[in-house]
Image (spheres, grey):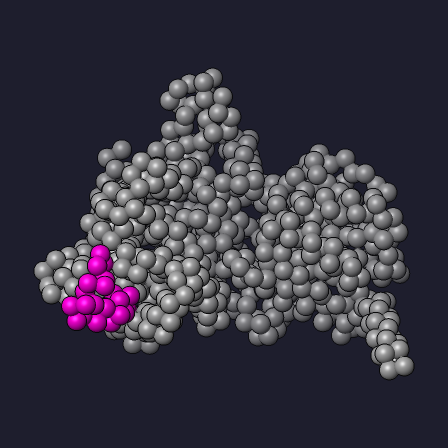
Amino acid sequence: MLEIITFSTLNGVLYGMLLFMMASGLTLIFSMMGVLNFAHASFYMVGAYFGFEISRRVGFWPGFVVAPLLVGALGALVERYGLRRVHRFGHVAELLFTFGLAFVIEELVNMIWGKLPVDYRVPPSLDFVAFRLFDTTYPAYRMFMLATAVAIFAFLLIVLKRTRVGLIIQAALTHPNMVAMLGHDVPTVFMMVFGVGAALAGLAGVIAGPALVTQPAMAGLLGPILFVVIVVGGLGSLAGAFVASLLIGLIQTFAVAINVSLADMVGGDAASRFGELGHVTVAQIAPVLPYLLLVLVLILRPTGLFGNRET
Amino acid sequence: MRKFLAGISILAGLLGGAARAEDTVKIGYIDPLSGGGASVGEIGLKHFQWLADQINAEGGLLGKKVEILPLDNKVNPQESLVQAQKAIDAGAHYITQGNGSSVGAALEDFVTKFNDRNPGKEVLYFNYAAVDDALTNEKCSYWHFRWDASSAIKMTAITNYLKTKPDVKKVYLINQDYSFGQGVRVLARDMLKAKRPDVEIVGDELHPLLKITDFSPYIAKIKASGADTVITGNWGQDIALLLKAAADAGLQANWYTYYAGGAGGPTAIKQAGLVHKVFDIVEGNPNSAPESAQKTETEFRQKFGVTLWYPRAVNEMRMFAKAVKEANSLDPKAVAAKLEGMTIEVFDGGQGTMRKDDHQFFQDMYIRSFGPLDPGAKFDEENTGWGWKQQGKIAAADTNVPTTCKMERP
């Protein structure tokens, strides 16, 4: 039992931190531009593929640094020459633009790297066992992922709360017109935020690529859950995104470990009234729980846990 | 006048087209060619086009060329029926499909009804990979023929092999939560109980189909259960990601799978370093195949850069050609009558028979494991440098599972 709790906690926190690396950029972009960026998870995928491509040529570490920068540049370009033009036609056009972009990116990835998963490896320098607990090993690479995610969180917190850039971003979140009046170049701020958001997603891709399988479907698998995170956390709230990411990471991993069904709790007769549902274990519905949470949050607290704006 | 001439020429074109259409034997290939299943569907299509080319190179069937019509069904039963109708409208009397037993059930039903309503225009459904047992049991149809071993045959082979492995004591079942996965789980439970009553089933998991990105929580559970063996029918990314998570946690269990050889599986096993701990059950293994099959395998790999995944597709087309020849007709009804009970030399050596009772094909099956290539072994997978090694052979007679089919013959 202790073994499952320990490893579920570790896995849950790790998954949560990975979600946070993407959700942080997405929530900032969303609150700033009012656009749900459907292509955000695609940047994560592009990051993984860039990381793979660089790592097989010059090694993992150059990829670790360069790939996110490339993805960030790509994101900035998308904002500058795509979103900004579409912006004048309103939010629906922007939404459709990012929606289409996600498909375009997926098809491009299909064409360039093929539909099969690529052989993206954990670097040899991190390919060892970090520790062994209850006879289960925990790979060093996962510890590295965790450390990277924590470092990114600290970095974002400091930039947003302690620097002048962060001050402007925060102001632009709520009062973009006033910030522009004060002489700041708001479109550039938007571009920077979009670029950094994409870079963070790219970094998440670079480090998640070797741990999970790098394949064209990876964006589609992670995309929906990101929206859950930012809505549950509250729009524009970094702290909210952080808490929601961890919450969802932990809920999902712990739910898997629970083999209890309704029938076990209230007895078979009472549960049989719910038909099939009465015998479904919590483990089976684990992947649905975040969406259940999404619905509950929208009903009970539409601003999200930490947000102060209506979704 | 000009319009009239144009009309004539169009009409002539259409007639010409129709005349040409009758000159080929059309086979509708209905499988995913876009979306998540495309990686498998594309490779399947290459198999059939290549097999058709071979038949054509030898003069075709009764002097007519074989033509494969690629039709994209997106693994969707609804879409498949539209495509089946399209194939029939284009003049096809034969359709073939493999991915997804849900699609297979829909097509079998469609073909049966179509043939009831259109006597004289019958259509045959050749199934090369949809393995749900229902297709040859309660749903069985005279117009459906299956070359892939059904789920029950595969599980029989796996459990027969486990009889020779006394070190297997605690088994964990993990499967996808839909009809096929649930079927695998029931089969495994029943057969283990009968053949290895000493084995304890320490876990029986169903997880959502193709939705999990990180299997670590499931692996933690398997680990905690103390299982030494895992049995799974998982396919696609669900097997690749599962194996990867197992490697990360240092789970040193043995894996008995249906589809570890599919796209991404070999790469994941290599990364995980599970040397000869992952087994799968197939109808042919390139590294131990007879020379003729190895030669074909080499040609296929050189031409397409992928493994010849479907020896059963080769068997399917061979038997189709033989049935046409014996019937001396392309009439589906005559072909079906010849296919029933037909025995041929299969691609990987030995005899295979299409059982008359339920139109299920039986042949020798092979248990193999994945690891670094032995000296002399020729074929690796996905450029990993690792390949499959035969560990056991289950004779066709030992996989003879009973059927509940009550075949209605025309």
Q: Residue furthest left?
A: A162
Residue at image coords 47%, 29%:
A277
The magenta stretch spans residue A174: yes
Q: Based on the displayed image, in which of its 4 quarters is residue A283 positioned?
A: top left
Residue at image coords 54%, 34%:
B186
- In this rendering, is residue B205 above or below B101? above
Q: Nearer the viewer, residue A243 or A116?
A: A243
Q: Residue furthest bottom?
A: B2
- In the rendered structure, the answer to whether residue B392 lies left or right of residue B332 reads left
Q: Residue B375 location in percent, x, y?
A: 47, 67
The count of marks equals 0
Q: Residue B100 location in percent, x, y?
A: 59, 49
- In this rendering, is residue A296 above or below A240? above
Residue at image coords 29%, 76%:
A58
Q: Nearer the viewer, residue B380 or B57?
A: B57
Dominant secondary-structure state across the stretch colored magenta: helix
Q: Which residues are magenta?
A: A172-196
Quadrant where the C terminus of chain B lies? top right
Please indicate, yes or no, whether residue B138 appears anywhere in the rendered image.
yes
Q: Residue B252 location in percent, x, y?
A: 35, 48
- In this rendering, is residue A282 above or below B17? above
- In the rendered structure, the answer to whether residue A271 lies left or right of residue B22 reads left
Q: Residue B339 location in percent, x, y?
A: 80, 52
Residue at image coords 56%, 40%:
B179
The magenta stretch spans residue A177: yes
- In this rendering, is residue B217 above or below A104? above
Q: Nearer the viewer, residue B345 or B124?
A: B124
